[in-house]
Amino acid sequence: MPEAMTGPLGMGLAILIGYLLGSIPWGMVLARLMGLGDLRRIGSGNIGATNVLRTGNRKAAALTLLLDMGKGAAAVLIARALWAEDAAQMAALAAFLGHCYPVWLGFRGGKGVATFIGIMLALSWKVGLAVCATWLFFAVLFRYSSLAALAAAGFSTMWIFIFREGEMFFLGVALTVLIYWRHRENIKRLEAGTEPKIGRKKADDES
């Protein structure tokens, strides 16, 4: 690979590829392809799997979840293959921001949890699986999807430390802060005791 492609230009391309992959609104694409209507006019208006599920189409919701995870993982794997680990991490951050703030939708996207999980799995499968297990544990125990998402993000840095993946630490902190910021309304409802539980109609979602 030419030297220029491994320097600032390569890093810039990794960030651009990551953002473009992350900004693909798979929920909206699948809703349109499957004739489910305009996702922006359904439920919370969010673009993630939770809102797709409100259409009643579980297949579309499952595909949205997998594809949103996949775009985060793809950004990491492509950048790692073409450049290096630092480029993979920048691509990961860009993919997350692309999901949350997609240019195609006026920078109004989802909350990034599925994309975050895909990123963690691609960077370190051990950390990724631990993050998934954390989400599942809190979701089953407390029945709040938002709380499970916050716990999974919050504990991610602990898993990074335990599995000695120190190069991921700062990215993990940055993504955790962003997830908490994107969930600020959910946090207020959790504190007020008004956050709907899993299986009930939600005012907002976590995807």
Image (cartoon, rainbow, N blue to C red):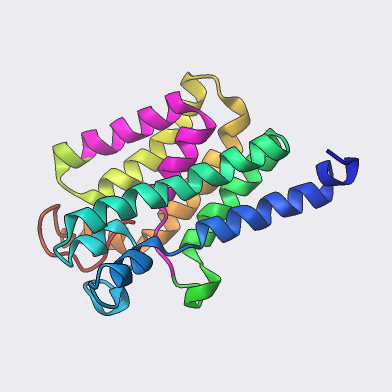
Q: Provide the residue span drawn in magenta.
A: 109-138
Asked whether the viewer can see residue 47, the reply is no
Name the side, left or right, on which 187 lies relative to 202.
right
Q: At 27% from the left edge and 48% from the top edge, which residue is drawn? A: 147
Name the side, left or right, on which 43 lies relative to 149.
left
Q: At 42% from the left edge and 54% from the top edge, which residue is drawn? A: 112
The image position of residue 28, as x and y in percent, is 35, 69
The image position of residue 3, as x and y in percent, is 89, 40
The answer to whether residue 74 is magenta is no
Asked whether the viewer can see residue 72, the reply is yes
The image position of residue 36, as x and y in percent, is 22, 72
Name the side, left or right, on which 119 lies relative to 188.
right
The image position of residue 139, as x and y in percent, is 20, 41
Q: At 27% from the left edge and 44% from the top edge, which residue is drawn? A: 148
Q: At 75% from the left edge and 48% from the top edge, which residue is drawn? A: 11
Give the quarter of the image for residue 183: bottom left
Give the quarter of the image for residue 185: bottom left
Relative depth, front residue between 189 and 11? 11
Q: Quadrant of the N terminus?
A: top right
